Amino acid sequence: MPAALLLSVGLALAGCSSGSSSSSTPTPPSGSSSSSSSAPPSGGSSEPASGNGAIAAIKTNWAKFFSAKTPTAQRIALLQNGSQFSSVINAQANSPLALAASAKVNNVSLTGTTQAAVSYGLFLSGKSALAGQTGVAVYQDGVWKVGETSFCGLLKLEAGGSTKGLPAGCKG
């Protein structure tokens, strides 16, 4: 499992993992074909809260959160209560593993008007690194964001299960 721990160090800047619940191996991400905007909505506009539009927004935002091509400020905006985690995201933004990381969402199940279960895979340089991950997306301020519980799950993995030294949002 050392590779998984190394990956978690690199992915913590934009990672989210609350465990594995599936043994399926995701396919590597392909070129982006999303029609969604490259930035979270602003100026009063919002993403759909339900239906296929919400699922598409979650898939797009999840991939952006993990992408090294996404500016750090936008990654912070795509994380639930992201400002609480900005120091961690900024500190690890340029690590070699983080720069090689990406995610592909396999399935989204809307579980309410403000939450969704997400099944995804993590990749390193296009190769599957952590398959069958599960996480939570949260609808906050009109945007579907990676849930802080998912992000904290990866930070805890990186810290060997300890919450010592983690942001306050991960200790509750």
Image (cartoon, rainbow, N blue to C red):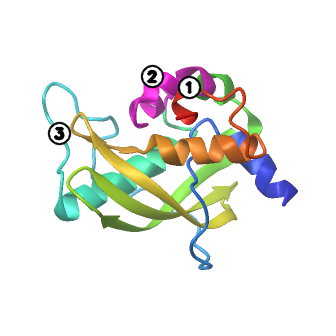
Q: Nearer the viewer, residue 110 or 96?
A: 110
| Secondary structure under the numbered disc 1 in the rendered image | helix
Residue 65 picture location, percent across and down: 48, 42
Residue at image point 14% right, 34% down: 45
Residue 49 lies left or right of residue 170; in this view the side is left
Q: Amino acid at mark 3?
A: Ser
Residue on which the image places disc 3: 46
Identify the mark at residue 138; answer none if there is no mark: none
Circle 2 Cα neighbour tier, 10 Å, few/some/many (<14 / 14–19 / ≥20):
few
Q: Position of residue 8 (x, y in %)?
A: 71, 47
Residue at 78% across / 45% down in the picture? 160
| Extent of the magenta region | 71-88
Horizontal and vertical percent position of residue 29: 54, 62
* Residue drawn where x is 80% and y is 47% of the image: 6
Q: Which mark is on residue 83?
A: 2
Q: Look at the picture and state if 89 lies above or below 30.
A: above
Rendering coords of residue 26 (x, y %)? 57, 72
Q: Please tell me which of labels 1 and 2 falls first in the chain.
A: 2
Judge left or right: residue 118 versus residue 51: right
Q: Secondary structure at mark 2?
A: helix
Give the residue pinned by disc 1: 168
Q: Residue at x 56, y 35 (%)?
A: 170
Most foreground residue, 111 or 120: 111
User: What amino acid is at disc 1?
Assistant: Ala
| SS state under label 3 | loop
Depicted 103 relative to depicted 151: above or below: below
What secondary structure characterizes most of the magenta part?
helix
Amino acid at the residue labelled 2: Ser
